[in-house]
Amino acid sequence: MSESDSVDLEAEHSRATTDHETIKRWVEERGGSPAHVAATADGDDPGLLRLQFPDTQRDHGEIEPISWEQFFEKFDDENLAFVYQSETEGGRTSRFYKFVDRESLEE
C-alpha cells in the first residue's frame, strides 16, 4: 500500500489508509490529536500510538500528547495503516479507528 492509497473495507463500513493528510484531517475533524502511551516510551521512541479526543482525556491517565511529526515517524517505522470509519451505520460521525500492519491489508 503506497502512502496515497486508501482501501475500502466494505464488510465493516471502514476504510484503510496510510496517507498522512487523510489521517490528520480525520482526527482533527473530530477534535482529536496524536498521542502515545507514556509508559511504553523508550527514549526517542514514543511507544504505543493512540489518538486523544477531548471528551476521553480523563479516561486515559497514561496517554500523553505527541507531535504529528513524532506520530507519523513511528507510524511509518512500524509499517502501520489506519483503519477508520467516517460514519456509524446510523449516519453519525464515527470515531472508530485502529492501527493495523499494512501487510495485513494486502492479503
Image (tube, helix red, strand yellow):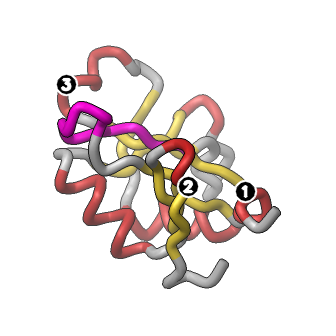
- Check the image and report above or below for 99 versus 102: above
Amino acid tagged 1: Asp
Image quarter of residue 51: top left
Range of residues picked out in magenta: 88-98
> Residue, x 82% and y 62% (percent of image)?
107
Q: Which residue is mark 3?
A: 55
With 37 as the anchor, is 40 left or right in this view?
Answer: right
Q: Residues within 10 Å of mark 2 (few under 14, many from 20)?
A: some
Task: Determine the secondary structure under disc 3.
Answer: helix
With 5 as the anchor, is 41 left or right in this view?
Answer: right
Lower position in the chain sequence, tag 2 or tag 3: 2
> Residue, x 38% and y 63% (percent of image)?
23
Residue 46's disc is none
Amino acid tagged 2: Leu
Lower position in the chain sequence, tag 3 or tag 1: 3
Rounded to the nearest whole Å, what is the CA distance between mark 3 and mark 1?
28 Å
Q: Which residue is mark 1?
A: 101
